[in-house]
Amino acid sequence: MFEYIWNNIWDNKEWLFSGVGIALISGLIFIVRRILSNKKWPFDENEFKIKPFPRDIVKEVDSVPPFQVNEKERSYIGLKIQWKCTLQDIKKRNGDEILISFLDRGNYPWIYCNVSTNQYPEFKILKKGESAWVAGKIEEIRGNTISVVIEKIKILKK
C-alpha cells in the first residue's frame, strides 16, 4: 500500500509540486481540518443553544393568533442561547451598568442586555457595527425585541 502511494507521488511529482498541486493539497488540508474541528461556537453547545435564531423566534411569535402571542412569548423564557450579534447602541444606567442594544447579525430583531463595564470594560471603546457572541437566558420577548440575561460575552476582534 505504501509503495503504491509512494510510486503515485513519484510519477506525478511535477504536477504535485507545481502551484496547482500545492493549492489543491492546501485546500484539502483546510477542508479536513475544518470538518474534524468540533469547536464551531464560542460557548458550550450543550449549555447554550445556537437555534432558534432571534429572527425565527419573532417570526414564530408573529405567526400565532393574537390571543396566543403572550403564551408563545413565554414559551421561550429561560431558553439558554448563544447568538452572534452586532452592536448598535449603549446607554449608561446606574453605576457601572449599561444597557446594550444589539441586532441579530446586523438585522432585526433587537436584542437587549444589561452588563457591567467592570466585567466587560471593552464595551467602553467598542464601535457601532462590531460583533460579539452573547450567551445567556432569554428573559423577555416583546414584539420585535428580545431581552437576554447575559452569562457570557465574547467580543470578536476586527
Image: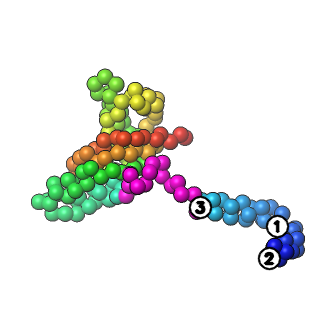
Name the side, left or right, on which 149 lies relative to 119. left
In the image, the segment drawn in magenta is 35-51
Above or below for 78 versus 113: below
Q: Which mark is residue 36?
A: 3
Identify which amino acid the numbered label 3 is placed on.
Leu
Q: Could one spot residue 101 in this view of the protein?
A: no
Image coloring type: rainbow
Q: Main secondary structure of the magenta part?
A: loop
Q: Which mark is residue 1?
A: 2
Q: Residue at x 77, y 61 (%)?
A: 22
Q: Is residue 46 magenta?
A: yes
* Kind of element beneath mark 3: helix
Q: Could one spot residue 140 in this view of the protein?
A: yes
Q: Nearer the viewer, mark 2 or mark 3?
A: 2
Where is residue 27 shown, x and y percent of the image?
68, 62
- Residues 110 and 153: in front is 153
* CA neighbours of label 3 inside 10 A, class few (<14), some (14 to 19), many (20+): few
Identify which amino acid the numbered label 2 is placed on.
Met
Quadrant where the N terminus sits is bottom right
Residue under label 1: 16
- Snapshot quadrant of residue 60: bottom left
Determine the CA span between mark 2 and mark 3. Answer: 25 Å
Identify which amino acid the numbered label 1 is placed on.
Leu
* Kind of element beneath mark 2: loop
